[in-house]
Amino acid sequence: MTGIGTLAEGPLHAAVKQWLARPGDRVEVPVDRFVIDLVRADGELVEIQTGGFGPLGPKLDALLDGHRMRIVHPVPAERRIVRVDADGVVLSERRSPKSASVLEVFDRLVAFPSLVGHPHLVVEVLLCREDHVRGPAPVRSTGNRRRTKDPGTRHLDAVLARHEVRRPADALALLGVDVPEVPFSTRDLAALLGAPRVLTQRVVYCLRLMELVAPAGRDGRTPLYRRV
């Protein structure tokens, strides 16, 4: 069935929705003044968010207290770069050296970390194998000879794993390591996680709002944190 919001969705969004759908589910369903990606037969509202979580704010504010809601976020754990010509003929394929981990969800959770643990909210992370389909050559950004802008489109190949976050402890478990009990900096945690510093700063921000870590003074000008 073609729904109200299907014309604007990308191929990854459409494929994830199809992958999630079960018998009895309805797609693109008006609920109050919003359109929901998928409504389960048991009434759960499912929203697929391939980008940031910020745009979901109005829906959560209006619907979360009265409805069970699930936010599904696909992460490209493996990706292949596929270049095609104007007719869609494949010119080349290669595996991208870039990959993302389940920690990427913290980059999105900064929009509302304090909602984690709400009895009606589940955040589900899908680790995916994706094809990133792009044009025959990178497109250079206007006025910049070095940078190129060629995001292409994301296509789902397979779902490799799925993780649910229902409460703050589930978010902590996504780290895959024990947060130190002694004071630590974001640099210390980044080394432990093997993650970029900026992403680790967002992890710590979310954990603070979830009351899982707390400030623990400073080492010179560097803020320190401790596990609660």
Image (spheres, rainbow, N blue to C red):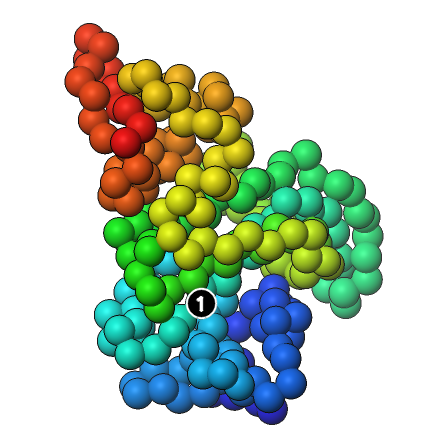
* Residue at the (42%, 39%) spot, across then down: 172
Q: Quadrant of residue 179?
A: top left
In percent of width and height, residue 228 lies at 28, 31
User: Residue 162 in the image: x percent, y percent?
Assistant: 60, 54
**At label 1, which amino acid type do we have?**
Arg
Element type at mark 1: strand
In the rendered structure, the answer to whether residue 176 lies left or right of residue 64 reads right
Q: Position of residue 197 (x, y in %)?
A: 41, 26
Q: Going 75% across and 41% down the picture, which residue do you hit?
A: 95
Q: Horizontally, is 49 left or right of 33 in the view? A: right
**Residues packed near mark 1 inside 10 Å, few (<14), some (14 to 19) or many (20 plus):** many
Towards the viewer: 155 or 179: 179
Quadrant occupied by the N terminus: bottom right
Q: Say if residue 21 shows up in the picture.
A: yes
In the rendered image, the residue lying farthest to the bottom is 1
- Front residue of 75/176: it is 176
Give the residue at the far top of this rendering: 220
Residue at image point 38% right, 74% down: 68
Identified at 72% across, 47% down, the residue is 80
Give the image location of residue 54, x and y in percent.
32, 58
Q: Is residue 54 left or right of residue 128?
A: left
Disc 1 target residue: 70
Using the image, determine if residue 100 lies above or below residue 154. above
Q: Is residue 130 visible?
A: no
